[in-house]
Amino acid sequence: MSMIAAFYDNKSILITGATGFLGKVLMEKLFRTSPDLKVIYILVRPKAGQTLQQRVFQILNSKLFEKVKEVCPKVHEKIKPIYADLNQKDLAISKEDVKELLSSVNIIFHCAATVRFDDPLRHAVQLNVTATQQLLHIASQMTKLEAFIHISTAYSNCNLKHIDEVIYPCSVEPKKIIQSMEWLDDAIIDEITPKLIAGRPNTYTYTKALGEMVVQEEGSNLNVAIIRPSIVGATWQEPFPGWVDNLNGPSGLIVAAGKGFLRSIKATPMAVADLIPVDTVVNLTLAVGWYTAVHRPKPTLIYHCTSGTTNPCNWGKMGLQVLATFEKAPFERAFRRPNADFTTNYFTASYWNAVSHRAPAIIYDFYLRLTGREPRMTKLMNRLLRTISMLEYFINRSWEWSTYNTEMLMSELSPEDQRVFNFDVSQLNWLEYIENYVLGVKKYILKEDMAGIPEAKQHLKRLRNIHYFFNTALFLIIWCLLIARSQMARNMWFFIVSFCYKFLSYFRASRTLKI
Ligand SMILES: CCCCCCCCCCCCCCCCCCCC(=O)SCCNC(=O)CCNC(=O)[C@H](O)C(C)(C)COP(=O)(O)OP(=O)(O)OC[C@H]1O[C@@H](n2cnc3c(N)ncnc32)[C@H](O)[C@@H]1OP(=O)(O)O
Ligand SMILES: NC(=O)C1=CN([C@@H]2O[C@H](COP(=O)(O)OP(=O)(O)OC[C@H]3O[C@@H](n4cnc5c(N)ncnc54)[C@H](OP(=O)(O)O)[C@@H]3O)[C@@H](O)[C@H]2O)C=CC1
């Protein structure tokens, strides 16, 4: 019997960010392994014209939850969506809802955040710092609270090369930052942002670091723990391999490469690709929830959920395996044939951007215009290149994260819990994982049917022929122009033709002699 699974039985759990990538997998695992849990409260906002109930309905009816419905048929009754908006004061939770939460919640998993790299500091502070502070304030009044688990990121201190499982204070206290956001105007905030984030590439990593400080300071009277995952990828094993549903991190680039938009990238092939499967993060999170509630460790423990120290994979290996999977199962209606050139040189990268990205987009838009359609490829390409420029920081560096607390926790688990809540990535086979990841992107993000693979392969063959035809035509045009204008080119042409002629004559003569 799993002690962790049994721990969550009859518990009331509060999850923020339950509609997100990590939150959904967390809910799924909780229901599947502890179907007797009492209730999961989720803080949700209406979105894209959907009410809270419609959002929950959509999640429960997705493929991810198929197994849950077998194990826990009453899952609909056990999810309680609560209206909340992290952008608003006190999270905009109604008084009645707060009252219910205060009297019943046992465990909190705080996953909600803005993960955008380009968010203005004001918004990122509101979501990742102020909302965390407000949630802690509510949590501190909960009478039955046993643990508060905060999801941060392994990159919150990406300004350092070696990162321990400790909180590194930022130069300005989070309280001061929160206060200053109330009275500084946007222009001034934009001006001071580079100075504040000092050494970090974006407001996301900075505000996640501030969020950790808030958890440490304001959660001192609670049982808190912080989990720092690295780059969260598709599921490794559970509930099935390859599940992913958003374009963050590598997923967006896999789509872009598979569809032939992205063919080269400024990346260091030997840099560690610190990917971590989302189900591994969830398993560690649930184990941390149990450990924090039962063992109440003091001081606050931080757990690194990374793969680089135990089982490193690099971007070069990942890129090759992504390409190998495209060979087996190409994406449908690709713009160009997939290719993955990694370059570390700025000038080579700029050259390939011009030749492999911008030029084909301009040519395609020209073709769209000629055929009376709206040009769109250049715009799309500019957006993609902007995205890539934001990810480049992470694919050209390696970090070392110590994992003592994570290893200590593993040693505290029973063999059954180590199996059910496995977070040991040393067993992960990268080639298999990456293949499943790419297939998952095809199936669950692009919603492409595997039955369409033969047609997709045919399409790639057509693209290859167009490519050969285009290159040959281009070569001939350039050559004809050269011959028309330069005596040296004409001499060379004469030399090549006569050389070929002599070679063929010799070849024919020697064959006649042999006969
Ligand atoms: C050459 C061959 C390569 C072979 C493949 C090899 C793979 C290498 C992968 C390397 C990946 C490295 C990733 C490192 C990431 C480090 C992460 C640190 C970990 C964390 O803690 S945080 C979680 C990660 N967060 C993110 O990834 C968020 C990044 N996204 C953003 O910040 C914004 O979306 C972005 C990129 C600024 C774009 O903003 P904007 O222009 O406003 O666009 P939208 O967000 O509205 O989206 C527009 C459109 O683009 C799609 N989209 C969104 N994100 C991506 C993405 N990452 N890649 C591609 N496309 C993306 C989005 O769905 C929208 O599509 P629509 O069709 O709806 O318009
Ligand atoms: N993905 C990754 O690679 C990594 C993620 N992390 C951390 O893991 C956690 C989860 O990330 P992930 O699941 O990938 O992110 P997602 O973007 O998929 O999910 C974010 C969640 O936060 C919610 N949220 C955002 N803004 C608000 C708001 N104003 N009010 C209420 N809810 C809001 C979203 O709700 P809605 O659906 O309404 O938008 C969504 O449920 C985050 O804390 C992130 O920092 C850490 C390392 C890597």
Image (tube, helix red, strand yellow):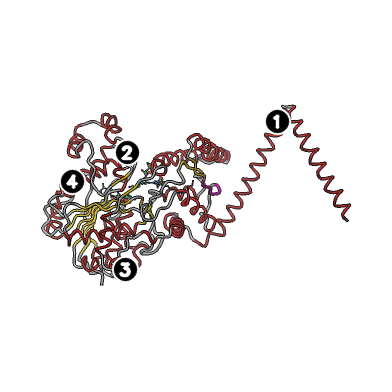
- Point out which mark residue 69 bears: 3
Q: CA distance from mark 3 to mark 4?
A: 35 Å
Residue type marked 3: Lys
Q: Disc 1 marks which residue?
A: 482
Whichever of labels 1 and 4 marks the residue nearer the N terminus, that label is: 4
> 209 or 270, which is in the foreground?
270
Secondary structure beneath disc 4? helix
Whichever of labels 3 and 4 marks the residue nearer the N terminus, that label is: 3
Q: Residues within 10 Å of mark 2 (few under 14, many from 20)?
A: some
Res 388 → quadrant: top left
Residue at the location (36% across, 59% down)? 425
Q: Which residues are magenta?
A: 336-340
Q: Residues within 10 Å of mark 1 (few under 14, many from 20)?
A: some
Q: CA distance from mark 2 to mark 4?
A: 22 Å
What percent of the width, then of the height, locates residue 484? 73, 29
Residue type marked 2: Arg
Q: Nearer the viewer, mark 1 or mark 3?
A: 1
- Could you tell me if the residues under marks 1 and 4 are in contact, i.e. CB atoms within 8 Å? no
